[in-house]
Amino acid sequence: MEINLRSPNIIMKLSRLGSFHQSKLSFLRSFLKEFKNWEYKRDLFDLNKFGHGTAVYSLKKDSRIYSLICYANELKESERSDRVIATKWDAAFTLYDGVPTKYDIERLRNEVPKQEIGRLSYKELTLSRANKSIRVFNHVVESLSNGKQPNTNLLSKVGYLYRTTAVYGSGKFGLADRFRIKNRKEIYGPFRLEMMLVYLVRQFTFDQVNYMAKLNNPKLAVSLDKNISRNLGIGNSTGLGMAPFIVNHPTLLNNWIFAREKALKKIREIKEVKKEDFDLFVNCLKKSVKNITSWNTDSTYQQNKIKNLLNDLNKFIKFIEKDFNFSEEFLFNKIYLWTEKYSGEECIEYIVSLMMEPYDDIIDPLINQMSSEEEKYFNIPTDRKIEELKKILEEKYSEILKIDFSKKENNKNFWFISKNKEEPRLADRFKENGAELEQPLAIARDIKKLYDLLSKSKNSSTIGKFLSSDNNLRHVVRRAFISEKFPYSEIQDNTIGHAIVPIDMLRLKLSFFGAVKFDPRSDKWLRICMFQGAPLPSELNNHNDQWIYNSLN
């Protein structure tokens, strides 16, 4: 049976993209799988009794070594902030290419804690900073100092000891440009270095609390239980800085979504589903429901999402336990069609992720196709005709062409770059100044403008001639020709309309990272957790690939 790929007009809507969840395609999960045979070491750990100082960790395979350098500094409570305008943090980190010398460690001690205003070199690959979850961190240190394990109920509500507030790479602030490392086979998958940094930072947080507890009370102190450590992750606070990424990288976005859609298609086309594969799917499903109930958020928006997801999943479990016939052919196709009929978007995409769990043979080849050499698709085919471009717009942007941008509600917002931190922001063009500084992120509006202009041009004229007289829309001309080859390269929604929920854009990207426990703090920023349940570095070469469905007990 041949199953069609799902239509971009459905999948690329923001409400659907904002309902995506982690899966076997997610970067942190594929990273752990690829790095399971690497040698892990703690090379330096020089902290005082307050937990301040320097640590170095490394991952090595053959002749390749990557080292995380950690700088934990004193931070007054009045200085602690997750906002991007912060200038000090509890800890700062860089992933170094190779083995840092004493000189490198001292050089970077003066630069890494400064973050954006520090001076970094091509030997530094990624940069990050993080703040403690003070209540949890102090509780853990105090408990361990007194010879007791911490309260797991408290830990489960937060899920981490530290949360990062940014992870930078790819040439930012002097870091190594991508061209220097893009051909390294061991890190070919997307965001491998960023995942490595966050994973090693997680281990640093465990080592730090153990060390502080031991110094506080050498006779009584105990180490954090490995099961508790394993079920703690690294938190992250993410704002609008992440949102434009998926607009500015259309071929990369396509490759992420296409991998997911191709996996779903192949799984739905399986005629005879093995019982052990179906049992694994059901096992992950039931474990995950327990995990969802541990998500903690004050956001009414997210609480409703969680409530609806749990209701739909419970209906689905009842269906497969009572009304489902395992002996039928194309089981996963029947499951998918049932979810489309009886579930909301959040549940549909949750089940899609779970359906991938039994199928390494389908997923693993797709992971290697999720990167993109974007520069290959930058050139505009200027010899193509106006008629051809109009046809592409009519086929690929049919929903967008229906939007009336003369209405205020469809032209309400504008994206700009903040002056102090050079971070993307969203503002109301009818209430706030600065619309003249608008960034080219209103793709839907610009596509409509382009179509209207093309409609006044000769069909037989070339794109080159059109651009020579009107160059303002060059960026969307390029995007249109990209969408011709890459069906999932474009969000099929209005990113400046009154109804936009910016965190849908954040959730899309974070789901591919492998984030869980989405906790919106507004419609523009949220907290998440990464690597919760993941094996510890010493367990990398012997772990269950479904670790992410384990709950903190």
Image (spheres, rainbow, N blue to C red):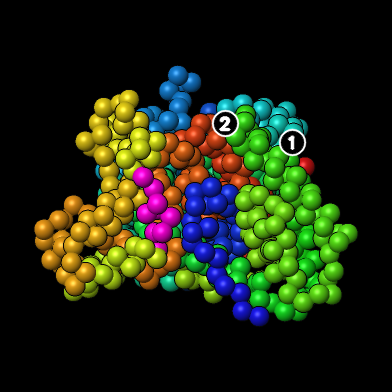
Query: Residue sitting at 39 percent across and 36 percent down?
Result: 409
Query: Residue sitting at 79 percent across and 51 percent down?
Result: 315
Secondary structure beneath dot 1 equals helix
Q: Position of residue 545 (x, y in %)?
A: 67, 62
Q: Residue furthest top?
A: 78
Secondary structure beneath dot 2 equals loop
Q: Residue furthest left?
A: 469
Q: Is residue 464 left or right of residue 300?
A: left
Rendered view: 365 above or below 180: below
Disc 1 target residue: 152
Rendered view: 74 above or below 510: above
Work out whether residue 158 can be spotted. no
Rendered view: 484 above or below 282: below
Of residues 122 and 454, which is closer to you in this image? 454
Q: How many neighbours does mark 2 have within 10 angstroms: few (below 14), some (14-19), or many (20 or more)?
A: some
Q: Which residues are magenta?
A: 396-404
Label 1 sits on what residue type? Answer: Thr
Badge number at residue 133: 2
